Amino acid sequence: MHALIIGGGIPPKKELLEQEMAKAQLHIGADSGGHVYLGYGHRPDIVIGDLDSFVYTRHEGVQVLEVADQDSNDLEKCLDYACKQGARSVTVLGATGKRFDHTIKNLSVMRRYFSIFEDIRFKDNHGELFLTESPYSPGLPVGTGISFLPVEGPVTNFSSTGVKYPLTQGTLAMGVQDGTSNEITSKDAVVHFDGILGVYIIG
């Protein structure tokens, strides 16, 4: 099963929302994310969170699950629910933007659930972010924009081929070096490295 979660960050455009809804069998609103579904004329299967933002009393028929636990954020609550329902993959919209600390927290959440789901990724109106282990073969069309990010710690022995700015046995580390705004130049592009790599596909 594939689950779609909408968080409280910058809302997706209607086209992106409906594209992702069509791929998912479970539609979840993370607290105020429930308003995004409703605002576009759709109804989530459930809205989950501490419900400090979703005024559910104004939306009859919307199933809600209040989880008051303050040791986890609303995204974690939704991911736990999706996992219990049997979801093996998850796409999250509205995970980024607005408060910067919330964005960083959600990146931490992505790392925590990386080994729990077969695939977990954040999508916004500009692209998509996910984590991966080595080797990674994008399999993307030539000309696609791509960024490589050390989201957990240094990514060592980083070597890339089939991209505009290749690197051999390098180290990606915060404040030292990263691989933002690269570009696919070959359908056989591949990256080898040690560690957990963040990948952002642009467009």
Image: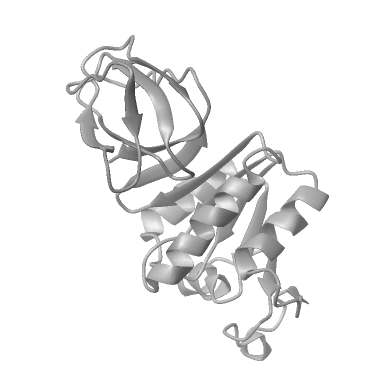
Q: Position of residue 89 (x, y in %)?
A: 64, 40
Which residue is at 26% across, 13% downward? 162
- Residue nearest the observer in this picture, 35 or 8: 8
Q: Position of residue 174 (x, y in %)?
A: 34, 46
Which residue is at 61% across, 63% downward? 75
| Quadrant location of the C terminus in the rendered image | top left
Q: Position of residue 88 (x, y in %)?
A: 71, 38
Q: Is residue 29 above or below residue 121?
A: below
Which residue is at 52% across, 75% downward? 35
Q: Is residue 37 above or below residue 199?
A: below
Q: How is the rendered protein coloured?
A: one colour
Q: Position of residue 92 (x, y in %)?
A: 53, 53
Whether residue 23 is visible, yes or no, is yes
- Residue nearest the observer in this picture, 48 or 179: 179
- What is the tally of numbered marks visible in this picture? 0
| Quadrant location of the N terminus in the rendered image | top right
Whether residue 94 is visible, yes or no, is no
Q: Is residue 203 above or below residue 13?
A: above
**Horizontal side of residue 146 vs 10, given as left or right:** left
Task: Say which quarter of the image contains residue 137.
Answer: top left
**Horizontal side of residue 83 vs 12, given as left or right:** right
Which residue is at 53% across, 67% downward? 37
Q: Residue furthest top?
A: 188
Task: Say which quarter of the image contains residue 119.
Answer: top right
**Horizontal side of residue 194 vs 112, given as left or right:** left
